Image (tube, rainbow, N blue to C red):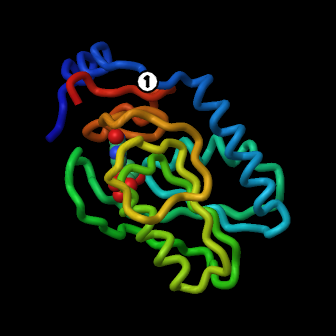
Amino acid sequence: MTITYEQAITVHEQADQLITGEQIAAGIDTMARQITDAMAEDMPLVLCVLNGGLIPMAQLLLKLQFPLETDYLHATRYGKKTVGTNLSWLARPSVDFKDRTVLVVDDIFDEGHTLAAICEYLQEAGAKQVYAAALLNKVHDRKVEYRPDFIGLDVEDRFVYGFGMDYHGYFRNVEGIYAVKGM
Ligand code: IMP
Ligand code: MG
C-alpha cells in the first residue's frame, strides 16, 4: 500500500507520541556505556541492520569513542507491510567478520525472529563473538528464546514508527517514537 500526502499528514497528527527524542538519547547513552564496557578493546565490526537501524546506529556510533569499523546488512521481516513472518536477505555484510567481535544494531526487538536469524548467521559464518543492540524492546510475551545483549528502551505493544522505523515506508525521519492511532 502506498499512502498519499494527506494520509501521511493525518496519520502523524493523530498518532500518540510514546517516547520523546530526549528519552531516546538517554537510552542510547546507557546502551553506549554498556557496549563500551563490553568491547572497547576488541576493535569490533558494527553492523547496521538497514533500513530501521540507520538512525539508531548513527546516534549510537557518535557515543562509541573507541576503535571500531562499520558496515551494513539488509535483512527484513516485514518489508513495507505491518504483518508477516518472512525473513529475506537483501544484503549480507561485505567487510570480513571472521574471528572478529561483531555488534549488530537494529531498531526494534519485536518477536525476535529477525535479530535471532541474523546473529545465528554471523556466528555460523565465523564471527568470534556476536552481540546485538536494539534501540527498542516491544513488551509482550510472543518472543523467541533469543534475547539481544543491549536494549535502549521498552515500548508498548503497538505498531510504532519514528527514529528509523517506518509506517508504509514513511516517517523514518521523525524524532521520537509514535504509535499509529488504532494500531
Ligand atoms: P521481529 O523479527 O519480530 O523481532 O521483527 C523485527 C523487525 O520488524 C524490526 O527490525 C522492524 O524492522 C520490524 N518491526 C517490528 N515491529 C515494528 C513496529 O512496531 N514498527 C516498525 N517496524 C517494526
Ligand atoms: Mg528492521
Pick the front one: 94 or 46: 46
User: Which of the image's four quarters has the C terminus?
Assistant: top left
Any atom of ligand 1 within 8 Å of the CB at mark 1?
Answer: no
Relative to 90, 54 lies left or right:
right
Secondary structure of the residue carrying numbered label 1: strand
Residue carrying label 1: 18
The picture quadrant where one finds residue 98 is bottom right
Q: Residue at x 47, y 76 (%)?
A: 120
Where is residue 110? Give x, y as percent.
Answer: 38, 50
Residue 123 placed where, x, y %? Answer: 55, 80
Check the image and name the residue furthest to the left.
1
Q: Is residue 71 above or below residue 55?
A: below
Name the one closer to the observer, 91 or 78: 78
Q: Amino acid at mark 1?
A: Leu
How busy is the neighbourhood of tag 1: few (under 14 within 10 Å), some, or many (20 plus)?
A: some
Instruction: Please give the name of the residue rendered at 73% of the width and 43% of the height, measured from the top-left corner.
Output: 62
* Side of 57 relative to 90 (left or right): right
